[in-house]
Image (spheres, grey):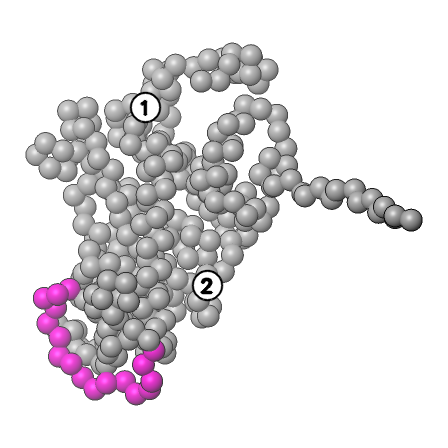
Amino acid sequence: MYSCSLLYHLAIRPCSRATLARVNEKQPAALFETVFFKLLERCRQFAPAHRFKFKSKLYLLDATTIDLCLSLFPWATFRKTKGAVKLHVGLDADGYLPTFVSLSEGKTHESNWANALKLPRGSFVVFDRGFNDYAWYQALMKNGVFFVTRLKSNAVIAPGSKRAGRKAEGISDDREILLGKIPDVLRMVCYRDPETGKELRFVTNADHLNAKTIADLYKERWQIELFFKWIKQNLKVKTFLGTSKNAVLTQIWIALCVYLLLAFLKFKAKIDLSMQQMLRLLQLNLFERRDLLALLKPPEPQLLECRQFFIF
């Protein structure tokens, strides 16, 4: 808790949780949603490029449920005794920025959200088996979008000819396949994880990339899992001020805005700190008058004065 003297010098009065809860009930969540997308535009101007050699956009798709107590949040129906909202995110691999964001009821399926996305032609999307929808796969191919995902264990495939070329380490198979009732020929890449020994089967329509890159693209999907974990652990989206739908959405959009502010500061100042380290420093100095760059950048090493002594 910050001292009253710090709040006084900032012309701020102490504020109770009840007051914040009342504000969250009344202030429209759409306001913070608009702020989020304005911040996103600024962040994208300074975001570093993704680590893969192709220049096309790479998006990582996933969703996470945010659990709510059904007795306190009766509007957030999910299961008989459990409430939840679902946060859908398409993470841009350029700086890992949440570019496509949507909040829905907890029972909304990922594929319903994915079908409504307007992905740019020539871009890549990576997603897990929760997005399994063959009709959507066909729509992506029709719109010139490349995808990489894992095959389900019970997927019906018709193996085709093997692809020519030398296999990279870890690649056990690379061939053409027909998947279900999809008329277009797809590609299956099998990769054996050296740590676990488990074989992973990927399906893609990207014929122009080597098999190892396909496996690396799916591995990149882990970044969106880390994004969700970071948001939940550091930005307090599990404890809410207010019980209305507007209050919950307001707090989630504010948390996403905080993430973008940290990302912008990291991109702009080129700070060699993790997002968590930056957040901790800012939390400790939130109401102090400090220079941000001086606070976040490590002090320059001081050269010790060297004196040379001569012995006669």
**Residue name at image x 41 percent, y 55 percent:** 92
Q: Secondary structure at mark 1?
A: loop
Q: Is label 2 in contact with label 1 (beta carbons under 8 Å)?
A: no
- Point out residue 62 in the picture as x, y percentages from the top left corner: 28, 52
From this view, report whether residue 151 is shown above or below residue 260: below
Left or right side of 77 for 300: right
| Mark carried by residue 241 | 1
Q: Which residue is mark 2?
A: 51
The quadrant of the image that shows the N terminus is top left
Prevailing secondary structure of the magenta residues: loop
Q: What stretch of residues is rendered in magenta? A: 152-168
Looking at the image, residue 82 sits to the left or right of residue 18; the answer is left
Give the residue type at disc 2: Arg
Q: Quadrant of residue 285?
A: top right
Q: Residue at x 51, y 32 (%)?
A: 282
Query: Is residue 200 visible in the rendered structure shown here?
Result: no
Toward the right, the furthest residue is 312
Please give the name of the residue rendered at 32% of the width and 81% of the height, measured from the top-left corner.
167
Q: Residue furthest left?
A: 80
Residue 179 figure quarter? bottom left
Examine the rendering and report whether any part of residue 258 can be seen.
yes
Instruction: Give the x, y percent position of residue 29.
Output: 35, 32
Residue 150 placement, left or right of 259? left
Name the residue nearer the viewer: 195 or 226: 195
163 magenta-colored: yes
Is-magenta flag for residue 303? no
Identify the mark at residue 264; answer none if there is no mark.
none
> Badge 2: few (under 14), some or many (20 or more) residues near its Cα, within 10 Å?
few
Q: Residue at x 21, y 86 (%)?
A: 161
